[in-house]
Image (cartoon, coloured by chain):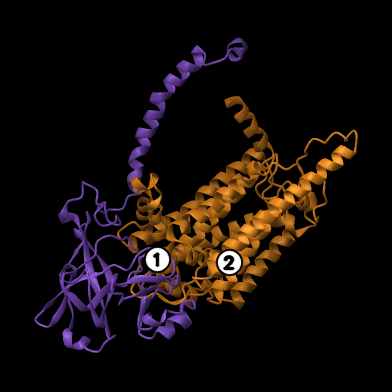
Amino acid sequence: MTEEQTSKGVNRRTFLQLLAAIPAVGAVAAFLAPFLRYLKPNLEPGLGVPAGKLPPNLAEGDLPKGEPLPIARVEELREPWSSKFFVFTQKYPQYTPEQAKAATVPGVAIKLPWKLPFPGYKQGQEPTDIVIFSRICPHLGCIFNYVPNWQEVTAGYGGYVPPPDRRHALLACPCHLSIYDPADRQVPGRVLSGPAPRPPRYFVYEIREGVIVVTAVEPGGIA
Amino acid sequence: MWDRLREWFSERKQKLDLFDETNVERYGNPLYILGQIVYFAWIVVVASGILLMIWYEPTTHGAYTSILRIQREIPFGWLVRGMHKYGADMLIIAITLRIYRMYFLGEYKRPNELSWMILFASLVLAMISGLTGYLLIWNQRAFWAAKVVLTVAVYLDQIPVLGNTHFGSAIAFAFLGGPAEGQGTLTRFYAIHFGISVLLLVLVEVYFIFTRRKRFTVSPGVLLLLILMLVATSWIFPAEMGRRADPNRTPLPILSDWYFLALYQYVKYTPPLWAGLGPGLLIGYGMLVPFLDRSKGRRPSERPFFTVVGIMALSYFLVFTALILFNIAVIGRDPHIVLLITAFTLTLGFVLEIRYRRKVRAAEAAAPRPAPRPVPAARPAASPGA
């Protein structure tokens, strides 16, 4: 024993012991592996994955969908900066007895004083003055607010003072003080301040006989 | 190498001290009964928790109402709930103070590395237990706190190569138990909240049986005093209920349990990936500090760098907590100030460390024959109050 240990390198006994350990470890791992299933919720993969990066095993039909939702008549949003809150219900395909689980996405529709291309309306081809955003903060999933008066943002959301050309209604999140500009001409919902990594998700909408109908929400996002 | 590791481990195992039960002769100093307070508060929390389980209903519809019933209708329900909540607070306070004691007095050094690591891990587990238990009330504060914490994990997917496995989302979904915070989350949090305590209690019982140590080495009078403190607190400040959770409305400002507040302020300042990495690095530093700190002495003045880091961590904890309580955060300005102060403090610690080492070397050179250094004992020779 002492002789074997003093010699450098792996001796025969250790080698055989290691060799014998491999199937033993394998057997234990095989026994424990099914318990990993306990951690995984009944949920399609790919939710929470950024748009365009869906894993190949996820078919188009597995994407979360919702029923088209009429939210307001166009006349209701005639005044610039008038707004309308609504809650959109998404259905996720799941292996539950009901076959589907509803998850809600609160949103806000805002009338702007100027027109801009908005990706949710005719895929940004035609400028519009109605923008509709999901109110789920893209930072950590809180529900942010539509604040009609920018001075309220300065007072209540961490002292951010917008530059003169942005002194209008803003979107502001109470959790970590991210502030968005719904009326930015290049990027509607541009992040003005705070830790948010991207603008809030947009709703896809159409106008059917004078009624604003929300049909889908920009995919991706866990919260 | 295997044998050396085993030897290292067995030596630390012999000196293992989880609840200050080997420090009996120093109980005159309240800092040395902190471990005993941890154990006692834990037993109180488990006992009251079992009583609460009888009436608690773990559903999104019934949770809040059932706790309201415990608080208002069940005889002494308010007391049991108060003991559970304030007992948990006492536990966290005692662990934290004990960590600071061990840190500043260098008690994590050989042969106490393992004790320190277990203590530090237990703080993390206690905080997880706090977070998961907090959600069980299903009120606004807890709902949004849990949502924010679970979403932080999603951003770990942004780590360059590792992120391609989407392990961050996997962690989030494992805790969420569904596409969004709901019944699945509540059930899983209930299981985790209960599981952590039960598992650790069994392990600690094994530890006491194998070491044949007494569970309570502190006098019964102290335990009675602790109980009275908990009863008085539950009586004077009944445990809060908050408002019922509303998934479509976020309150302003959102807060959490007091020991998470500093972290929340930090999350406002950083890009979301760092909101997850920062605490991870902090935990890593805490776990590895016995191996990072190679200095010989145990007194704070004998290892200036680590003392400065400890003071900085404590100050940030207090200042950030105060800032979030008063809802002060200027996102455009504060992060720069924090970074500047951190860089300055770390440099200061580094300079102090080098100056101290130079002085020691000069003193050694001046004395022709230095006295042989005594073998490090289990406990520092310095008086406990130092």
Q: Is residue B337 left or right of residue A152?
A: right
Q: Nearer the viewer, residue A205 or B201?
A: A205
What's under tag 2, amino acid-wise? Ile
Q: Nearer the viewer, residue B199 or B246?
A: B246
User: Helix, strand, or loop for circle 2?
Assistant: helix
User: Helix, strand, or loop for circle 1?
Assistant: loop
The chain displayed orange equals: B
User: Residue sitting at 86 percent across and 42 percent down?
Assistant: B363
Q: Quadrant of residue A104?
A: bottom left
Local crowd size for mark 1, using a 10 Å CA cut-off: few (<14), some (14–19), many (≥20): many
User: Residue sitting at 47 percent across and 16 percent down?
Assistant: A15
CA gap between label 2 and label 1 equals 20 Å
Q: Is residue A27 left or right of residue B5?
A: left
Residue identifier under label 2: B337
Q: Look at the picture and state if B94 lies above or below B299.
A: below
What's under tag 1, amino acid-wise? Ala
Q: Is residue B357 left or right of residue B38?
A: right
Specify the quadrant that holds the N terminus of chain A. top right
The chain displayed purple equals: A
Percent of width and height locating residue B343: 61, 57
Residue identifier under label 1: A196
Percent of width and height locating residue A106: 29, 73
- Do the residues at pointers 2 and 1 share their chain? no
Specify the quadrant that holds the C terminus of chain A. bottom left
- Res. B177 visible in picture: yes
Which-is-in-front pick, marks 2 and 1?
2
Percent of width and height locating residue A118: 22, 72
